[in-house]
Amino acid sequence: MSSYMAKPNEIKRKWYIIDAENKPLGRVAAAAASILRGKHLPTYTPNVDCGDHVIILNAEKVVLTGKKLNQKVRYYHTGWAGGIKEIRYNKLMAENPEKAIMYAVKGMLPNNSIGRKSIARLRVYKGTQHEHAAQKPENWTGDIK
């Protein structure tokens, strides 16, 4: 018996909504990364981009456990000499919580062309309103503790 290998032209993408209210940042990001890769599907194929679209709502109400809100730091480089910058998560969550979730999900995806295509299917919103009602998104029923 041979294994099933998904083909790019056979993939039907669905839309899912994840409500991040009072849920840990890492758990929400892990669930979103799994859906974006397509690991929840029985037809998952590692070398084919077979994931679905994800909408994350209530980004400002996501929780960082322990002392991470005050101690966790994101470093980035501007590209110029001596251009290393840092931003603390208490400032990042106050100003732009959507970026904090995007950084977490992107770090859980592979660093290749499949990961770059997958992150483009992620939409993060601060509140409960989104503009994708025409796509008929379903609520994600998987467990996020």
Image (cartoon, rainbow, N blue to C red):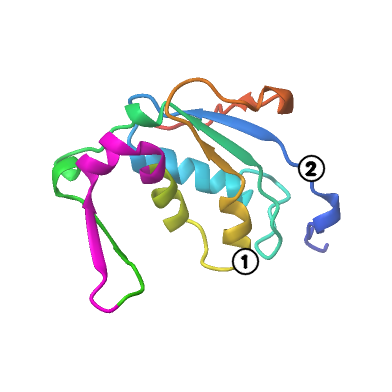
Residue at the limit of the structure toward the bottom, as seen here: 81
- Which residue is pictured at 36% across the width and 44% down the height? 100
- Which residue is pictured at 22% across the width and 58% down the height? 86
- For label 2, count other residues whose C-alpha is less than 10 Å away and answer few (under 14), some (14-19) or many (20+): few
Q: Are marks 2 and 1 in contact (CB under 8 Å)?
A: no
- For label 1, count other residues whose C-alpha is less than 10 Å away and answer few (under 14), some (14-19) or many (20+): few
The quarter of the image holding the C terminus is: top left
- Which residue is pictured at 40% across the width and 31% down the height? 59
* Disc 2 to disc 1, C-alpha distance: 19 Å
Residue 73 in picture, x, y percent from top left: 21, 54
Residue 23 in picture, x, y percent from top left: 35, 30
| Viewer-proximal residue among 20 and 116 | 116
Tell me the residue that label 2 is attached to: 12
Residue 97 in picture, x, y percent from top left: 35, 37
Tell me the residue that label 1 is attached to: 113
* Res. 60 image quadrant: top left
| Viewer-proximal residue among 46 and 18 | 18
Q: Which mark is residue 55?
A: none
The local secondary structure at tag 1 comes to: helix
Above or below — where is 137 with respect to 100?
A: above
Above or below — where is 144 with respect to 50?
A: above
Amino acid type for the residue under numbered disc 1? Ser
The quarter of the image holding the N terminus is: bottom right
Q: Which residues are magenta?
A: 81-100
The verdict on residue 123 being magenta is no
| Viewer-proximal residue among 101 and 43 | 101
